[in-house]
Image: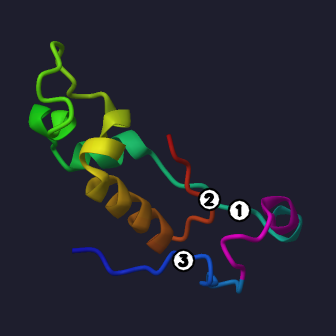
Amino acid sequence: MPATVDISRDTENQEGVRPSAPISEEIQRRVLVLDGAMGTMIQRHKLQEADFRGDRFGDHPSDLQGNNDLLSITRPDVIEEIHRDFLLAGSDVIETN
């Protein structure tokens, strides 16, 4: 289980910057680190068709495995864990779909 990271707007990162600080201001001070390869991180979880379907897409007529965008709906826990891991690794910017 990954360590817990408080990512609320009242939290400062290691450099003392709040998440709500404008990127344009922060990028003037230092290089910002983006998150990494989301697809690779998702693959590490070895998710199955049922993970992509969830309850919401159980009757969908096509295969959904590999449609990673659906995981924000069907497995938000996995997506949150991946984002937390990137933050713990030092990412400043987390991309979303």
Residue 21 position within the rendered picture, expressed as x and y whole percent measured from the top left: 76, 71
Q: Which residue is mark 1?
A: 32
Magenta stretch bounds = 17-26
Q: Is residue 43 above or below residue 21?
A: above
Left or right of 55 in this view: 29: right
Q: Earlier in the sequence, mark 1 or mark 3?
A: 3
Q: Main SS type for the magenta part?
A: loop
Residue 47 appears left or right of 8: left
Tell whether position 79 is magenta: no
Q: Quadrant of residue 42?
A: top left
Could you tell me the amino acid type at mark 3? Ser
Identify which residue is drawn at 27% across, 58% down: 77
* Residue 71 picture quarter: top left
Q: Which residue is identified by label 2?
A: 93
In depth, the one of 47 and 73 nearer the eye is 73
Q: Which numbered mark, 1 or 2, is in the foreground of this view?
A: 2
Tell me the residue at 32%/43% (across/down).
73
Q: Earlier in the sequence, mark 1 or mark 2?
A: 1
Asked if the residues shown at circle 1 and circle 2 are in contact, with their CB atoms under 8 angstroms apart, the answer is: yes
